[in-house]
Amino acid sequence: VSDVGLNHSPDLLVRAQARDADAFCELCKPYEDRLFRQAVVLCQNQTLAEDLVQETLIEAWKSLRRFNGRCRLFTWFCSIMLHRYQKTIRRKQPAVVADGLCEAMVDEQPSPAMASESGDRARLLQQHLDNLPHKQRQVIYLRFYVDNSLEQIAAALNCSPGTIKSRLFNGLENLRKMRGIQKLDL
Amino acid sequence: MKPCREFKQRIALSIVEGQNDDAMEEHLLRCTGCRTYAEEIRAVCGDHVHRAAHLPASEAPLRLHGKIRAALPDNPRRWNWARSVAAGALAALTIALYLFWRPAPKPAPIAIMPPPQTQLTEPSYVAYRHRLSRSAEELEAALSREDIGATSPAELLTVSSRVGVLQGPTSP
């Protein structure tokens, strides 16, 4: 997953940071589909995902002046989205699996049985992610799903690379234990 | 068999980052526990890399962009020359209307002074002295006019009663 084609013009960012709402909307538009896709992965529900993207971008608008360009804008959006998602989890809002989205996470027109199996796997992986401490989940998510380097993640989360490495290791360790318990065989 | 404690983080990070670590590879050849651990970490990474690579191709609903724009405030209006002229004209009109319609200034309050005292109802000490001195002058003038050199009290009373002096300064 790359950021190719999603580079924004610096002028647009400057205008958006100067509280130009139209410029901000223009800036966000190319990212909306990708953000929505990531939100669907997290929420596993289109309605919740839509709300999550909306909340994310409004939060991004409020704090856009704090974006310093040390990481990609999409990474920054994703870090905000994870923060908002954490709040959703705290509120114990059930991530209802609907619309057959997990079943849609299949390569090429699978059989219903395969689709069901893939859906179960996706659901289980998401459950493992949700069970991680928030800081570990942020790093794991940004590393695997947003495909960022550790330096980019460190910049987005405003941490040192050493802290990010430590969280990544602890997150992987916890996922390994959960996987061993669940006996997930992919 | 458990993995070596000092190698665990090194193994995990080298797998995630895809970096070659010759010393670690050599260690994995010798250590079964670490080899098993590395396989488990690879499986965990594989799960999520596979899932990330096959995310559903969801597209954001068309209404989402409109909802986001509606949630943001409107841009502040730019101040241009036309607005400046309009504002100036409005201010001038307001001032003109105020000057035209302003209420007439109230006259200054007139101090009500007591009427001047034209006559003294009672003789004052000064008036008495003045009257007395005038009477003495009149008496002296009458005496010199009539060429009376006498200074006896009887003669003085006679002359004074005739010229009307020394009758007391009771009335000014």
Image (cartoon, coloured by chain):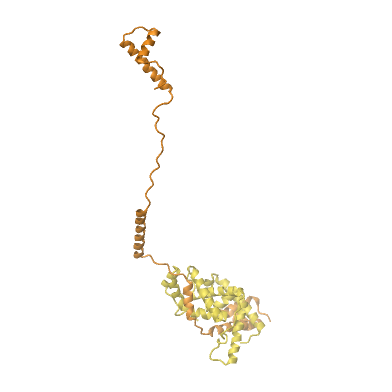
- Quarter holding the N terminus of chain B is bottom right
**Camera-nearest residue between B122 and A63:** B122
Q: Can you see residue B30? A: no
Residue A147, image x, y percentages: 52, 79
Residue B128: image quadrant is top left
Q: Please identify the quadrant where the C terminus of chain B is shown.
A: top left
Residue A65 horizontal/vertical position (percent):
48, 68
Image: B131 above or below B105:
above
Residue B19 at x, y percent in the picture: 55, 80
Judge from the rendering whether residue B5 lies leftward or rightward of residue B104; answer left or right. Answer: right
- Residue A15 appears anywhere in the view: yes
In the displayed structure, would residue B94 be above or below residue A147? above
The residue nearer to you, when weighing B32 against B23, is B32
Counting the numbered discs, the total is 0
* Residue occupying image coordinates x 55% and y 70%: A160
Residue depicted at x 49% and y 78%: B64
In the depicted structure, whether residue A143 falls above or below residue A19: below
- The answer to whether B8 appears left or right of A51 in the picture is right
Chain for colour yellow? A
Q: In the figure, residue B52 lies in which quadrant?
A: bottom right
Of residue A155 and residue B97, the one placed in the foreground of this image is B97
Q: Residue furthest right?
A: B1
- Depth check: B79 or A103 in front? B79
Residue at left offset 59%, top offset 86%:
A119
Q: Is residue B28 left or right of residue A76?
A: right
Which shade is chain B? orange
Q: Quadrant of residue B139?
A: top left
Residue A67, position as x, y percentages in the image: 49, 70
Q: Is residue B168 left or right of residue A59?
A: left
